[in-house]
């Protein structure tokens, strides 16, 4: 494929991130195919047109169905609210487009399964926006684990905390409505689960605990019950026999983007904090006792593709750069090359795990991931 | 009480720590009663005598029964292996001694209950060596929580990791035998539980997960099965309604004394790492957004009784100083003053929680702490 | 100006950074003028053409003189080796182009003065690539200082360390030749000086010390003397009366991009490390003693223009984003708006200070910056 | 020597620290000689008696001359204000006592020289309270440097900052009077200088800069001029050819006991912060680039004599423990064993350097340490 025509749905937080990634991927990686920013879609023609001018798309539309049907377009980015993912993704795949959809897949398992089925049937590349796995230092962590640098992994913990719902006086919104999903479980835990799957493999069974820090929130003149759970803790047992814990809290004052990963092995340990995602902590149990210690590895050209962004180590890539790497991973798949992109099959495994955790919480017992189906 | 005659059983790691605490408590706190280091007891008369000379005890003995019966002695420190605690503690209490016993209480709940009953019957002060709660910055954390500085607490996590069993080739020892207890659960989790109880109150129900990183260990010419679990994760629901997680791993390479505490509230958050126990992290959601952040509070005279040790802030107290503060808390109780000492009733609640977690692990379901009895 | 046609000279480390900044500035800031990537210039037509395709420039050339004379071009980026800056910059300014030149200005003070004179004569905007001052948290630091948050500043220290010349066995290169400049003084210290000027104002007099960690380096079959100094320390007295120290070492093993800034005031203190440039440390001496501490402020939308890149706080911008902010500051100046861009006048003050430090080192005495002229 | 009778002058901050060290040294190190806390001396008999009871001294006196002349006493600790050191130290040495004197030696070089001469003439052990060099991790740092772990050292920086004079409204005191010394130079810089001498050897020549953050301070109803300098920066050239910088500020808000040491070598780097003195940072330039990083070494039994205090690594010794190690180093010298104690000859070299820095500041030029004499 010499050129690739791109359509993007959505111009918000993630819409802009996709737009920047599409703008940058060629200049950063110096690689084919040549990306053409073909059409931008948002709710109104005016908004779409204004943002198309900003982001550098040639055309604008408010009709996403028309866009995904446009035969000129090769690949579609979907960055709309989760509840819209399934319909749009399935339509795009049916129209033969490659698909880059933001995470999570969809509020219900049935929809996620339908999305995966559509991807399978289409023969097209369909990936999800699990950008944290695209970090060069996460790639380094995986390489270290695979090379046995920390021996046999036997345990892990992953926490994900932010504070955007931490204010108890913040008004009730769709985020606190049951129809938007479970709460922190699908909103946040999908990220730790993507890292666990990426670094350590598939999950076999789970146990879950969820909590509501605030029972209700201001709504109009009164207060309205919060229907989702902003705190989740899940115990995981992986297929490999390794056990671990994932934890998420979207009311964690002071945490802005913390994803703290700890992987324990028989010869060493790895720790990583997304709030300092250009640093990787590594402890290896070798050499004299008196000089052992966790080492802080700074991201640099030794951790590809960091060097595509900056020639000097320790100068730090940013969040949007992770999206550009993800975009490159998407293009690699389209071109038939292996990549770290999280495809719909891998995404479906994450969704199944999410729903298994919710069921385990309801039932108060260990639940097999495989037992979940829509 | 003008003077207090002290007997100490044990001269190992904790025995020395108690001896130093007894030596220092008067000089540090400048307070009555006057401590007399009366008798030191260990397994052989020779060892006892040698260590008595080092530690500054007047007498030495290998007969602990005689020592705890000695009418001159007012208070006894017990620092022997856990399996010996019950017999020694009960004998000392029956002999009318005040008691400072190392944690945990005993391998079985029945023994722990018997110890608590003996304490109740004796009318004497009986406390446990939960030294981490004696940290001036933990006192500060508790004061902040009680004053509402972080609002209503809604969540917590406590991790405790060390690596003294991390080497898979370390020989099998009593630590891996079932008769020594559950493993990390009673060896480590009692510390996080003491902090949770101290900061947040009693636990209502629990869920537990345990794992063995290494199935067996070298023993003689072959290998012997590990019978204990070196990894534990427990979900807790407190009486207050707050939920949280405690995690422990004694095979965590690189962690030497990590106890990482996170307490989440409606107005802020507290974090603390025992490996940097002269620092407290505090985030408060007030003031302009652009200057909010976790602040690192360095221990100093503003955090009593730090100033009793060092006049200048930021100069750091050490682990043995925590033991001296604990000794002072013991003396305060003996003198009829309130203190942060963890007494046998509080200790029994910790033991009950430990056994409830073990049962929850066996049963795979939530277990009420109150349901546990010997 | 509705559109701006850009010419870029150089495609290396900084050339790519400029190219990415030009690509992104419109999409990130959603602002006019419309940037047109007109012509890319490098040493050979082939290289220029290949990189123009990658970076998205319409045309390519190996003739920089022709490019800077091209009447279609409005602004020129110069990212070539320092020794070429003066000639190119002066030519571009004379041709009426706005100019964005990488730092430092030039190896000699005479050339720097000529560049500044050319800028003055041209009436065009001429700025230098001091990207570190463009960090939203440096803007925050400056705002805090100006608002008196840390009281009256009385002292500062700035260190800049990297290790790209730390290997004593790395071959001799132009970086160790006297004709390339003084060494760390002009290569590194210009950055600390730009931060000092930006945060604290102009420098009055200086003292300097320089050193060579390695006397010679491998060259061919033998070794060749190192003519530059890789270590510099300079004492500064500012016009304001504040004193401070800047330190630079380009042989500092393990440091990859450390620029550690400490600013001391009568009410508080600010600290900042470029290796964690999404964090700012602030201590303010107010509130109760027991909860005072350095707070770690994470970069977020509260620190403009962070929010132009990412909607969520704590997600981190990267080094290339600093260049995009600098590009925006350049455009602001071109459009007649104030901005934080470091212009040639400010750059010349930095150059004068550099040469004053070198003279102070030679003479072993305090040297007035104003005494320097070519 | 089977027993050693100790006399201590002073019961303030350092007096208490010496008392605790004397109490603990035997119990911690399990070593001879047997320490007898013989006499405590302070300004009034009442204060001396009260503190003697607290600290565990047998006798008390307000007559230091009588005490240092007491033939029963073998060793004397002097912890009085600096201006009193010389008279007391010389008297004690003349009386044949071993001497442990707090740092610095004395306000004038003449007094320091007289003290050193008295020590020489006495044949007794005379050491100074440079406790920071007694840290097990500083010993580790020295061992690493000596073993060539970081190659040939070529540069260093040491900062020492506290904030006890940071408040501009704190009343004028003796600390701001010229007769107490230079200010931060003798009050603080002696510590960095002791570390530089201990780790890197003697200093050859110096340059100095000093500043007053506050020109005057409240005194009675008005204000009084500050006569000392609270900020110092000194450039050092060592006998070895290594250059470096020491910096001190006792008005540094938020810094409580920061002594930040950086040592740069041809194969690696060491960094250390006294505010986290149980941690040592080490970078070694070996192994694959992608896993290099500064490692954080936690103090433990692998760093003697840490294990004398605590059996488990990572549990942290405290400031007072450093004093106990120093006491042990004093006893070692008395017993004829080598130790890390800083004796009066080493102390005099520090004093000479201090006065050379002051002269360099006055003269505005490099000054040879050897040129200084009273």
Image (spheres, coloured by chain):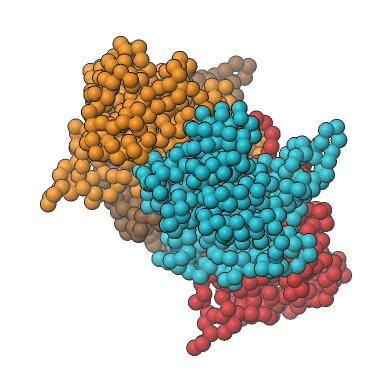
Chain colours: A red, B cyan, C brown, D orange
Answer left or right for C96 relative to A270.
Answer: left
Expressed as whole percent of the image width and height from the top left, the position of residue A339 reads 77, 54
Report the number of discs.
Answer: 0
Q: Residue furthest bottom?
A: A221
Give the residue at the far left of this rendering: D221
Residue D211 in view (yes/no):
no
Q: Residue at x 52, y 65 (%)?
A: A253
Q: Position of residue D267 (x, y in %)?
A: 57, 27
Q: Position of residue D342 (x, y in %)?
A: 40, 23
Q: Is residue B88 above or below residue D206?
A: below
The image quadrant where one finds the C terminus of chain B is bottom right
| Residue B110 falls in image quadrant | bottom right
The residue nearer to you, when weighing A284 against A61, is: A284
Question: Horizontal and vertical percent for residue D237?
Answer: 39, 23
In this rendering, the answer to whether D56 lies above or below C319 is above
Q: Residue at x 45, y 39 (%)?
A: B36
Front residue of A151/C172: it is A151
| For residue C56, side relative to residue C293 (left or right) | right
């Amino acid at each position: 494929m010499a050129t690739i025509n791109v359509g993007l749905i959505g111009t918000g937080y993630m819409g802009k991130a996709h737009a920047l990634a599409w703008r940058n991927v060629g200049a950063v990686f110096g690689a084919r195919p040549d990306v053409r920013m073909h059409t931008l879609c948002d709710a109104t023609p005016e908004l779409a047109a204004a943002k198309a001018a900003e982001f550098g798309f040639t055309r604008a539309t408010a009709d996403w169905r028309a866009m995904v049907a446009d035969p000129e377009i090769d690949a579609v980015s979907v960055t709309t609210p989760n509840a819209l993912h399934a319909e749009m993704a399935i339509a795009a795949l049916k129209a033969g487009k490659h698909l880059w959809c933001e995470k999570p897949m969809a509020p219900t398992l049935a929809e996620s399964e339908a999305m995966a089925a559509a991807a399978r049937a289409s023969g097209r590349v369909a990936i999800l926006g699990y950008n944290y796995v695209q970090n060069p230092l996460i790639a380094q962590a995986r390489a270290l684990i695979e090379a046995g640098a920390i021996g046999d992994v036997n345990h892990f913990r992953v926490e994900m905390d932010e504070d955007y719902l931490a204010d108890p006086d913040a008004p009730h919104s769709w985020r606190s409505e049951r129809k938007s999903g479970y709460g922190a479980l699908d909103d946040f835990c999908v990220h730790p689960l993507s890292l666990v799957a990426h670094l350590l493999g598939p999950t076999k069974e789970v146990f879950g605990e969820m909590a509501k820090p605030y029972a209700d929130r201001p709504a109009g003149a009164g207060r309205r019950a919060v229907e989702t759970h902003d705190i989740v803790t899940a115990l995981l047992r992986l297929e490999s026999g390794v056990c671990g814990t994932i934890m998420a809290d979207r009311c964690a004052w002071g945490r802005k983007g913390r994803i703290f990963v700890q992987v324990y092995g028989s010869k060493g340990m790895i720790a990583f904090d997304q709030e300092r995602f250009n640093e990787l902590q590594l402890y290896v149990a070798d050499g004299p006792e008196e000089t052992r210690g966790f080492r802080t590895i700074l991201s640099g050209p030794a951790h590809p593709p960091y060097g595509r962004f900056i020639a000097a180590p320790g100068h730090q890539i940013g969040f949007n750069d992770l999206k550009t790497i993800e975009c490159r991973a998407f293009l690699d798949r389209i071109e038939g090359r292996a990549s770290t992109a999280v495809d719909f099959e891998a995404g479906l495994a994450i969704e199944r795990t999410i729903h298994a955790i919710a069921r385990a919480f309801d039932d108060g017992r260990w639940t097999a991931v495989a037992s979940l189906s829509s």
